[in-house]
Image (cartoon, helix red, strand yellow):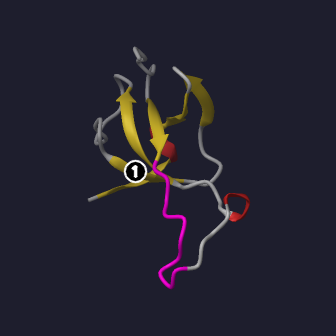
Amino acid sequence: MNFKPLGDRLLIQRVEEANTTASGIIIPDNAKEKPSKGKVIAVGSEVEDINVDDTVVFGKYSGNEIILDGEEFLIMESSDIFGILI
C-alpha cells in the first residue's frame, strides 16, 4: 500500500481489543465499541511528535474511515490525537 497523508493528517489502523473480560466473560461483536486506540501507519509532512508505529489514543468519533487494499483505516488530523501509549 502506498499512501501519504497530506499536511497534519495521519493514517491509523485500529488496534482490536480482547474479546473476553478479565473474569472470562466473552463479549459478542455487536456489544463491543470500536477501539479508540490504533497504530500509526503513515504521517503527513506537518505532523510533529508522532511517528510511524506509535500507538495512539484518539476520540471515539475521530477521523474518517477509508478502505485501502481491503483493510479499514482512519485518516485524522494530529489534533484529534489525545496521546501516545508508551
Pick the residue in front: 69 or 83: 69
Queried whether the magenta region covers residue 81, the answer comes back as no
Q: Secondary structure at mark 1?
A: strand
The answer to whether residue 3 is above or below residue 40 is above
**Residue farthest to the bottom, as pictured:** 23
The 10 Å Cα crowd at callout 1, few under 14, some 14 to 19, many 20 or more, is many
> What residue is at 57 percent from the left and 54 percent from the top?
59
- The C terminus appears in which quarter of the rendering? bottom left
- What amino acid is at disc 1? Val
**Residue farthest to the right, as pictured:** 30
Where is residue 55? Give x, y as percent: 35, 50
Number of residue marks:
1
> What residue is at 34 percent from the left and 22 percent from the top?
45
Dot 1 corresponds to which residue?
56
> What residue is at 40 percent from the left and 14 percent from the top?
2
- The N terminus appears in which quarter of the rendering? top left
Where is residue 64? Give x, y as percent: 63, 34
The answer to whether residue 45 is above or below residue 55 is above
The answer to whether residue 76 is above or below residue 37 is above
Q: Is residue 79 left or right of residue 51?
A: right
Where is residue 75? Give x, y as percent: 53, 32
Q: Is residue 79 left or right of residue 26?
A: left
Queried whether the magenta region covers residue 23, the answer comes back as yes
Where is residue 35? Give x, y as percent: 55, 55
- Residues in magenta, as a range: 15-24
